[in-house]
Amino acid sequence: MSAVPAPAPARTGPGPRGAPRRRPALRMKPLVPVAPATRIVLGVAFFVLFVAAWAVATLGGFVSKTFLADPLTMLASGWRLLAEFGFAHDIGMTVWRVVGGFAIAAAIALPLGVAMGAYKPIEAFFEPFVSFARYLPASAFIPLLILWAGIGEAQKLAVIFIGSFFQLVLMIAVAVGNARRDLVEAAYTLGASDRTLVTRVLIPGAAPEIAEILRMVLGWAWTYVIVAELIGASSGIGHMITDSQALLATDQIIFGIIVIGLIGLVSDFAFKWVNRRLFPWALLGR
């Protein structure tokens, strides 16, 4: 019987005439992280393509500038808003409202959420109402809040509080309640008291997820403050957008929207940076 010839080994070195070795094509696999540099390039590439498509649609005459201003006009209008109309003050007021309302909501939601996640009777008492309230749109409370608190800063802070508080409470309670049971049993085996279990096991174990919850809900708070500023406000980004809408100034409207997105992006990156420094073990592989 003649022997079957063995297959030729795969070529790993240079090809004929010194041709370089072929590199494998870039493949995407589920849950496989990409390199930081690749992530940055891909993220920037989307913005570049988006702005290019926007410029082609507007500067090319495919969309009327009455309905959608082109990027160059938008930038020029934005500069005038900052240099001549004090838009920087509006930005500062909006940021202050977001941070203030969100901070108040987080300060109350954190202990209540931890208590609900750790103690089931407390969860049984609060959870039905919190689940009911979190489905109520914050904008629906604006007429009542104007009657109760007027059109000042208290009304706007209250809108952000309502929009953020109930979401935070329920999500934090779920994060704390999902603690690993083996850690709980190990803590009791080592003689931990109920209070020690909460402060030394449940809270540290849920802290990375709670930090991510705060980051996500802060993004939602931006939507609530703009809604609050659309009615009964004399300053803020939402107020500027409302005035621009009455004048059909789409360039100013788009600039205000972009400013909101940029501030939110910066705050999101800041949250991620802080979370990586505080909880590096929770972000391995991301």
Image (cartoon, grey):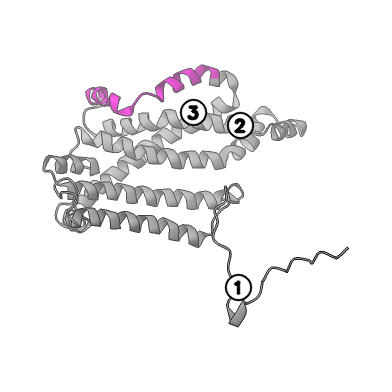
Q: Which mark is residue 21?
A: 1
**Segment colored magenta:** 124-148
**Occupied quadrant, residue 102:** top left
Mark 1 to mark 2: distance in Å?
50 Å
Whether residue 153 is visible here, answered yes or no, is: no
Question: Foreground: 141 or 188?
Answer: 141
Say whether residue 72 is magenta.
no
Q: Position of residue 259 (x, y in %)?
A: 28, 50
**Occupied quadrant, residue 229:** top left
Q: Position of residue 276 (x, y in %)?
A: 54, 51
Q: Say what secondary structure mark 1 lies in.
A: loop
Q: Say what secondary structure mark 3 lies in.
A: helix
> At label 3, which amino acid type do we have?
Leu
- Residue under pointer 2: 178
- Residue under pointer 3: 170
> At label 1, which amino acid type do we have?
Arg
